[in-house]
Image (tube, grey):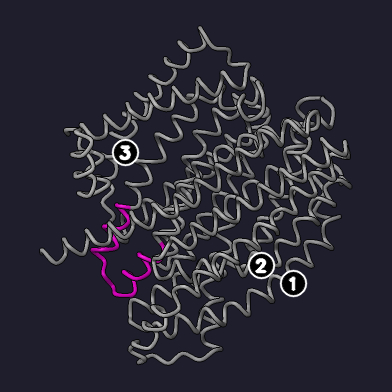
Amino acid sequence: MRENNLKEQNTQATFIKGSAWMTFGSITSRILGALYIIPWFYWMSPYGNIANALTARSYNIYSIFILISTAGIPGAVAKQVAKYNALNEYGIGRKLFHRGLVLMVFLGIISAAIMYFASPFLASNGSRSDPRQIAVMRSLSYAILIIPVLSIMRGYFQGYADMMPSALSQFVEQFARVVWMLLTAYVIMQVQHGNFVDAVVQSNLAAAVGAIFGVAILCWFLLSRRNSLNYLVENSENKIQVSTMALFKEIIAQAIPFIIIDAGIQLFYLVDQYTFHPMINSVVKVSYDTIETWYALFALNANKLIMIIVSLASAMAVTAIPLLSAAHAKHDYHSISEQISNTLDLFLFIMIPAAFGMAAISKPIYTIFYGYDQLGSNILYLSAFTSISLGLFTVLMAILQGLSENGLAIKYLILGLVIKIIVQYPMVYVFKVFGPLVATNIGMLVIIFLALKHLEISFAFNQSRTSRRFIGITAFSLLMFLVVLGVEKCLELFLSPFSRLQALIIVIIAVIVGGLVYALAAIKSNLAQKILGDKIVPLLAKLHIKA
């Protein structure tokens, strides 16, 4: 019994440590990816929203090609490396990584070439083809040559449950990308007074620049840790013999489900990309550029901000897969059940208050990044709540993948996507620009319900425990939401929500007050201690906070 408790504590500690690193990498890179938009959007004026629409459409296609070019192999490698490491077969994991690198280079070249030459066809927005879009898409194709290598290197470290290299490479990649974007946008728009499309092209080329820096930092980590990695390989059991062809088959068999599932959110976005323009045009008679501006409001403007908090879910998902895969390889079903509960509890504990908080300050935070826009603020408000379903989808799909329930995850995704397509037009007809977000939520909620039910039946996931914690978390988040709204309204009596600087002051004060309210409620109720583990207790003692 004591041994099981120690194992559970160690697993929980590993998960929380891994999640902390991945959260650092994801959050800092997302924050950088959001903060750059303030000067960038200002310099691009008056073409800011049109430039964002070009970027949003190109990035949706680019994201799909990234998934194709990596073919889900980084996730598959992380899962398989964790599996063999759990069996003390570190040599097979390294061999798998080396073979995967060759595959990544090949797939990167093929995918980059396809995206480059197919850009004229892909640039259609469901209404007409835009020549500006072709140039932007082609500038992104160069990154596809490099990112597959970057991704599999991250997957190798993640297979060792070592999340620090991945996290730091994310930060370095994004930092280099943002520097390039801002530098080129300033020179083209402010110094040369050039064409905004040229600036957008350079901003998208920044993805390749960032990827080069990301690969460089991971190469440094591989070199610095080669002695410890070599030791593990040299002391492997070496009882399992796997041929190169068998490894390739194993990688591909695991990778195909990863590419389909990892593309899940992007597939939902693609439905919006190719249906929003013709659908909204049939409902409201406005100009082409007006519809493009509306599309930018939810597809990039709001999406860029909510992805900061959705990245929390991605961080936990990446951490959960290797741990669940290792437990599944050992047929440790008690550990599987415990890890599912820990993953979902931690996700809800962080994600729900983050989403409620962003919704509460949607108006001033939108003003900070894009300038005052009531419609944009309203879209961000709904998008903030949508981030919960997007994040929960991400985590649940990762759990199913870690448990080798790939086929079932794909079926759930297809069903949710079909429902999204079916309800898309009715939702656009009723809710206009908000329609795509409502349709996304409906499709996602179906997937979430089915996945939770399956985990409860097949893996004895303790849904009642998570449900109780969900109720507590939601109640505390709602309390925080109301307090933040009250603080915001009071501050608006003295500060203008139309000013970027004054909106920033409102956000800072509201976030501090809201964070303290939620933290104290969670600690006083012992909810934080139950979810974060005993290690939080010494921290509370140092802060002189009593539960």
Q: Quadrant of the N terminus?
A: bottom left
Q: Amino acid at mark 2?
A: Ser
Asked if one can make out residue 292 in the rendered structure from this viewpoint, the answer is no
For the residues labelled 1 and 3, the Cα–Cα distance comes to: 45 Å
Q: Residue at x 64, y 19 (%)?
A: 374
Residue 327: say if magenta. Answer: yes
Name the disc covering residue 470, or none: 3
- 452 left or right of 308 in image: left
Q: Is residue 74 above or below residue 174?
A: below
Q: Secondary structure at mark 3?
A: helix
Residue 31 x, y percent position in the rendering: 55, 42
Query: How would you rate the neighbour count of disc 3 (Cα within 10 Å): few for under 14, some for 14-19, many for 20 or more?
Result: some
Assess disc 2: are there few (<14), some (14-19) or many (≥20) residues with their C-alpha within 10 Å of its C-alpha.
Answer: many
* Range of residues picked out in magenta: 321-342
Q: Which residue is mark 1?
A: 110
Q: Position of residue 486 (x, y in %)?
A: 42, 14
| Residue 69: mark | 2
x%, y% of residue 362?
Answer: 54, 26
Gap in Å between the C-alphas at discs 2 and 1? 8 Å
Instruction: Tell me the element at label 1.
Output: helix
Please say if the residues under marks 2 and 1 sit with CB atoms less than 8 Å apart.
Answer: yes
